[in-house]
Amino acid sequence: MEKQLILIPTYNERENVSALIPELRNKFPELDILVVDDSSPDGTSEVIRNFSNSDTRVNLLLRENKEGLGKALFSGYKYAVENGYQKIIQMDADFSHPTEYIKDILDHLDSNTVVICSRYVRGGGSCNWPLPRIFLSWLANFLTSILLTLSIKDATTGYRGFPSSFLKEFISETPIASGYLIQVETVLKSLRLGYHIKEVPFIYQRRRGGESKLDICEAFKSGWGLLRLRFKRYN
């Protein structure tokens, strides 16, 4: 039987994971869960430890410092490969990625396919999202498609599924991106390696609690990172 993992990066998501983990365990009891937490000061890791003490399918990977989403995900990818998972689903903890789409990801995920939940294909979209954030997301994907000549509609989404064969290749070298741009870098590398990318539509929701980690500083860093991806490694 295939080993399948839900990978959730967190920082100050105590309120959200307290509700998300039970929902995932109820809907998908056959899937393991790994939360990668960057030592959140709000005690997110303690919530996960409490779950894992009574449920062996829930695990915590605690990192010492907050070093960015990219490094947290990279640690999670290594864990998934080292522990023999064949299918890995990546999602956010804040309920912006509704859990019902996990089935769609698994239905399309195979050893040759990376699956992306897309806001910008037919049937996709955003719900209760402020216009400035919608514009920022659209602009990020537009610039990505122009600079990197990508035909993928939503290269920046964090809701996706990977086969272990791809992650083995991805962790073989240190990624350029340490922040949110790792989403784009995984798309680029999967295409370079010959993987098919399947975009499935989903409706992005406004986060349920807590605060977004994406700010203007991170947006500018991602813009510079796009240039590095274009001219340093993936030209």
Image: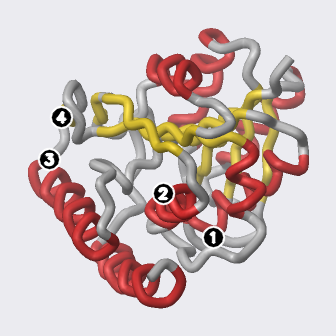
Q: Is residue 109 above or below residue 210?
A: above
Q: Residues within 10 Å of mark 3 (few under 14, many from 20)?
A: few
Marks 2, 3: nearer the viewer: 2
Amino acid at the residue labelled 1:
Lys
Q: Which residue is mark 4?
A: 128
Instruction: Give the mark, 2 or 3, whose residue is nearer the N terminus.
Output: 3
Residue 95 location (% of width, % of height)? 43, 32
Quadrant of residue 31 in the image? top right
In the rendered view, does 70 fall on the left or right side of 139? right
Instruction: Give the mark, 1 or 3, whose residue is nearer the N terminus.
Output: 1
Q: Which residue is mark 1?
A: 66
Amino acid at the residue labelled 2:
Val
Residue 21 location (% of width, % of height)? 64, 26
**Which mark, residue 187?**
2
**Which mark, residue 119?**
none
Amino acid at the residue labelled 3:
Pro
Amino acid at the residue labelled 4:
Asn
Spatial distance from mark 2 to mark 3, Cα to Cα?
26 Å
In the rendered view, does 46 fall on the left or right side of 159? right
Instruction: Give the mark, 4 or 2, whose residue is nearer the N terminus.
Output: 4
Spatial distance from mark 3 to mark 4, Cα to Cα?
7 Å
Of the pair 213 and 136, the residue shown nearer to us: 136
Spatial distance from mark 1 to mark 3, Cα to Cα?
27 Å
Q: Residues within 10 Å of mark 1 (few under 14, many from 20)?
A: some
**Which mark, residue 130?**
3
The residue depicted at 32 percent of the width and 29 percent of the height is 202
Is mark 1 in CB contact (under 8 Å) with mark 3? no
Marks 4, 2: nearer the viewer: 2
In the rendered view, does 31 fall on the left or right side of 2? left
The residue depicted at 34 percent of the width and 79 percent of the height is 217
